[in-house]
């Protein structure tokens, strides 16, 4: 669903404990958004994990182990069409 939103900014918002990060992003300007997904993994753009954030604009993620992690978000509509990844954020 290319062009579903112009830009979804994912930013690191803070760490809670040793293995948890909280992420926040800007809302999509599209009126047909059904929710957001946060993708994360130890390789950039090859994410092994995904969590559904629903319509909220923040998500706390429990990391399975320490190390370098990459995050990106997508928006999706009621038909399941999903946007491209947002910009990526790295956290260690």
Image: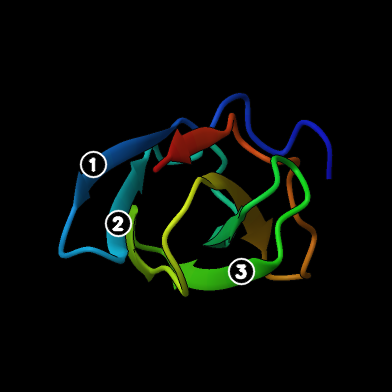
The residue singled out by tag 3 in the image is 50
Please state, as top left, top right, bottom left or bottom right, where the N terminus lies in the image: top right
Tally the numbered discs: 3
The mark lying in front, picked from 2 and 1, is 2
Label 2 element class: strand
Residue 85 vs residue 2, the one in the foreground: 85
The mark lying in front, picked from 2 and 3, is 2
The residue singled out by tag 2 in the image is 21
Across and down, in percent, residue 67 comes to 47, 52
Mark 1 and mark 3: Cα distance apart in space:
18 Å
Mark 2 and mark 3: Cα distance apart in space:
14 Å
Check the image and name the residue furthest to the top. 6
Mark 2 and mark 1: Cα distance apart in space:
8 Å
In this picture, is 40 found above or below 8?
Answer: below
Q: In this rendering, would 31 be left or right of 47? A: left
Across and down, in percent, residue 52 comes to 52, 72
Residue at (32%, 38%) from the top-left corner? 12
Q: Do the residues labelled 2 and 1 touch (CB within 8 Å)?
A: yes
Residue 13's mark? 1
Across and down, in percent, residue 2 comes to 83, 36
Label 3 element class: strand
Across and down, in percent, residue 15 comes to 20, 52
Q: Do the residues labelled 1 and 3 touch (CB within 8 Å)?
A: no
Q: In this rendering, would 39 be left or right of 92? A: right
């Amino acid at each position: 669903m290319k062009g579903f939103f112009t830009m979804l900014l994912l930013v690191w918002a803070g760490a809670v404990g040793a293995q948890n990060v909280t992420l926040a992003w800007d809302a999509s300007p599209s009126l047909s958004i059904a929710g957001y997904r946060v993708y994360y993994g130890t390789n950039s753009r090859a994410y092994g994990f995904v969590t559904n954030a629903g319509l909220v604009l923040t998500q706390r993620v429990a990391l399975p182990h320490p190390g370098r992690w990459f995050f990106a978000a997508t928006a999706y509509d009621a038909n399941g069409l999903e946007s491209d990844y947002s910009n990526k954020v790295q956290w260690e």
